Amino acid sequence: MLELESFSPNNFLNRSVKEMLPGEQPREKLMKHGAGSLSDAELLAILLRTGTQKLNVIETSRALLTHFGGLHSLIRREWGELRVIPGIARVKAITLEAAFELARRIQVAELGDEIQITSPEDAVSFFGPKLRHLNKEVFIVAFLNNKKVLSGFHQISSGGSNATIVEPAEVIRQAIINQANSILLFHNHPSGNARASQADIQLTKRISESGKLLGIPVDDHIIIAGYEFVSLRSENLFQ
């Protein structure tokens, strides 16, 4: 990771964007060759618009990517974290976080208005973009009707980077309030390891047993870790 004290003009070419050849300037390059021809840094530069006296906007974008370890890690950051980079003031940081959120929503929007979930893959297509980039652990219960169509979801808790506290009674209460015929459980592992812990398995069993008493079965509990996931149902980790 690039340390802040190493951000200096000597680390980069330090030409202003206006001094670049027209074919090198991000906006002109996009108009001539399409967005796919631009690097991650060049696309970020278009969003940021301007750099600083020491670093032009492309160099500022490269500093962002270097400091956070690439685009995959960068899009997990909240706007306040982005301001650690010189030249990224509040407005620019907010603009970036908004763009990252739009990208996640576009992935979900492609699924259409009626989301039917009949497999772990269906579930991850919808909830993966919401959970895979978070830095803290979040637990969600999703509500399905009798046709396995998603009728809504509710965030039960949000914790630290390693765990979050979940009360089974609150999960079932939300299922009743939302008139669910069945429910799906989701949480993320910011560590990147999707393997279910014993605590995950025991929690799933407790919620499943409570749901059975009220006729609201737990269809699955899915753990999302980046682009990996584990379905506890598929792994036969609960009845």
Image (cartoon, rainbow, N blue to C red):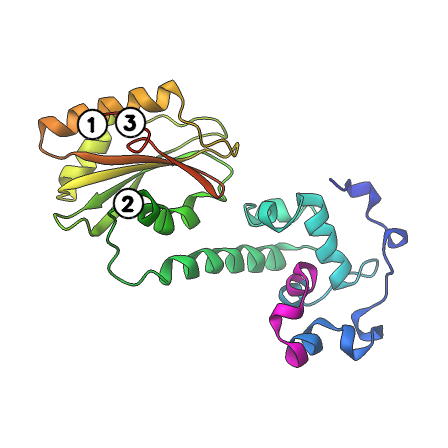
Q: Which residue is mark 1?
A: 208
Q: Earlier in the sequence, mark 2 or mark 3?
A: 2
Count of numbered marks: 3
Residue 114: quarter of image: bottom left
Left or right placement of residue 5 versus residue 174 in this view:
right
Where is residue 52? Give x, y as percent.
78, 60
Q: Earlier in the sequence, mark 3 or mark 1?
A: 1
Q: Earlier in the sequence, mark 1 or mark 2?
A: 2
Name the residue located 56 percent from the left edge and 60 percent from the top edge: 95
Q: Which numbered disc covers residue 136?
A: none
Left or right placement of residue 103 versus residue 220 in this view:
right
Closer to us: 2 or 222: 222
Q: CA distance from mark 1 to mark 2?
A: 18 Å
Left or right placement of residue 54 versus residue 187 in this view:
right
- Highlighted range, magenta: 31-44
Q: Which residue is mark 3?
A: 236
